[in-house]
Image: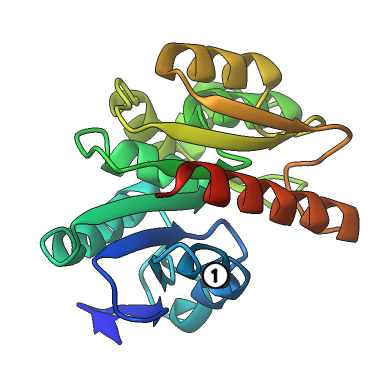
Amino acid sequence: MRIGNIPVILYGSASDKLFLYVHGKHSRKEDAEYFAPIVERRGYQTMSFDLPEHGERKNESYPCTVQNGVHDLKEIHSFIQDKYTCISLYACSLGAYFSLVAFQEVKFDRCLFLSPILDMERLIQNMMRWSNISEDELKEKGEYQTSFGETLSWDYYEYVRNNPVKRWISPTFILYGENDNLTERGVLDSFARNNNCDVTIMPNGEHYFHTKDQLDYLEIWLQRVAYSIIS
């Protein structure tokens, strides 16, 4: 199906309970296939969609900026908010950051975050430091292609600085890899403390959960939070 111009998949039998699944960078809506059966056993449908420049939208002239990501998330939520009595959120990495910006005024039943980007301003500043480029230089250039495959954008950075995440009112459970190189441990601890989050840390885990051990750990975590907290 489509919501506006956004390709969407709805998993599971008809229900009044829904998990909105927001994937991360280099992913796509079909990656919700591993998640949907876990929560369906607790009576939830799962809705996933392609972020800009991902999945079916790779060739669209609609970049994956925070502005566009937030716009799409709000459009999806506007579509579902009156159709379900219970809405929860699962979001990964960049998708978690977009969600934090888009849904500051929304109270989900619960949120599950995998390797969330919690402070994008800090991350961009770190990337500038890794690339030995100053704020003034980035402002002058407009964009800068890093050696590690990321494009730094002054417009993106300026939007992030001017639109901080000031509040988060949904009960939240986080799975974080001990060796996450994008979200620093101090940033995680501060966010979790300020927002009363339940945090699980995988020893020797990374930001990107992709090895068999990491995926097994993720599945065990999902099973635990799904079966212990979802009614």
Q: Residues within 10 Å of mark 1 (few under 14, many from 20)?
A: many
Residue 106 lies left or right of residue 181; in this view the side is: left
Rendered position, 95 above or below 79: above
Residue 183 lies left or right of residue 173; in this view the side is: right
Rendered position, 179 above or below 30: above
Q: Give the SS element for disc 1.
A: helix
Q: Residue at x 57, y 65 (%)?
A: 38
| Between 86 and 196, the one nearer to me in the picture | 86
Corner quadrant of residue 158: top left
| Between 47 and 59, the one nearer to me in the picture | 47
Q: Is residue 74 visible?
A: no
Q: Residue at x 29, y 29 (%)?
A: 163
Q: Is residue 187 visible?
A: yes
Which residue extends farthest left? 82
Dot 1 corresponds to which residue? 32
Rendered position, 229 above or below 179: below
Residue 207 lies left or right of residue 28; in this view the side is: right
Q: Position of residue 176 (x, y in %)?
A: 68, 35
Q: Residue at x 52, y 60 (%)?
A: 23
Q: Position of residue 101 (x, y in %)?
A: 33, 37
**Which three-letter amino acid code belongs to the residue tagged 1?**
Ala
Q: Residue at x 80, y 41 (%)?
A: 206
Corner quadrant of residue 24: bottom right
Q: Position of residue 71 (x, y in %)?
A: 24, 55
| Between 11 and 1, the one nearer to me in the picture | 11
| Between 51 and 90, the one nearer to me in the picture | 90
